Image (cartoon, helix red, strand yellow):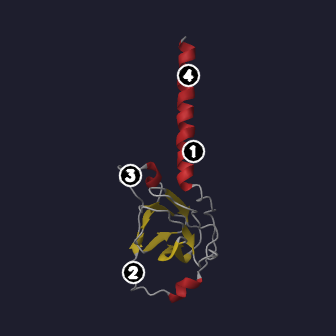
Amino acid sequence: MRTAMIILGVLIVAALAVGLKGRSQTSSSASTSPVASASVETSPLASSLDASASPVVSVSPITDSNTSSASSQADAVVTISETGFTPKAVTIKQGQTIQFKNNGSGPHYVASDPHPTHTDYTGLQSKDLLPNQSWSFAFAKIGTWGIHDHENPSMKMTVTVKS
């Protein structure tokens, strides 16, 4: 009987671990791009940016113990809603991750510029994020990257990735 209880306990722990891992992968499944890139690339947007157009936020790792497990794995959190991205510009280090969270009432679709081809940063495409859903992306390439909401292409932001 005791052996059966121990086996049952191990199975429960294993099932919980698989469930949590699956939940984590759902919110960050698109962040599988390799982080070990050493090349320096700059998007076409980098030379035309007006630094005074919007504030730039430099980020440090999230350490608040009250954050959810999904956001505690991100180095920055950007929200998107009907009013656009907040903040409008983020600066991170190469290999860091940004979590994009839909705080709006309808779907949003985070994508690399230019619209509609999304070719400046291959792989930077969330697909539809429903309200309260999140998607994370690890930035492996150095440069300044334009991002927009594919559903509302006039909603834009920039991510600057430094070494």
Provide the residue designation for mark 4.
8
- Element under disc 3: loop
Q: Percent position (x, y) of residue 120?
A: 62, 77
Tell me the residue that label 2 is attached to.
Answer: 54
Q: Which mark is residue 67?
A: 3
Residues marked 3 and 2 touching at CB (< 8 Å): no
Above or below residue 52? Residue 137 is above
Other-residue count near label 3 (Cα within 10 Å), few / some / many at <14 / 14–19 / ≥20? few
Q: Residue at x 55, y 63 (%)?
A: 138
Q: CA distance from mark 4 to mark 1?
A: 21 Å
Between 91 and 126, the one nearer to me in the picture: 126
The span from disc 3 to disc 2 (Cα, nearest Å) is 27 Å
- Residues tagged 4 and 3 counted as in contact (Cβ below 8 A): no
Q: Residue at x 45, y 49 (%)?
A: 69
Looking at the picture, which amino acid does disc 2 mark? Ser
CA distance separating discs 2 and 1: 37 Å
Q: Where does the image place residue 86, in percent across and percent down from the top left? A: 40, 70
Determine whether 43 is above or below 6 in the image: below
- Upstream in sequence: badge 3 or badge 1: 1
Residue that mark 1 sits on: 22
Q: Amino acid at mark 4?
A: Leu
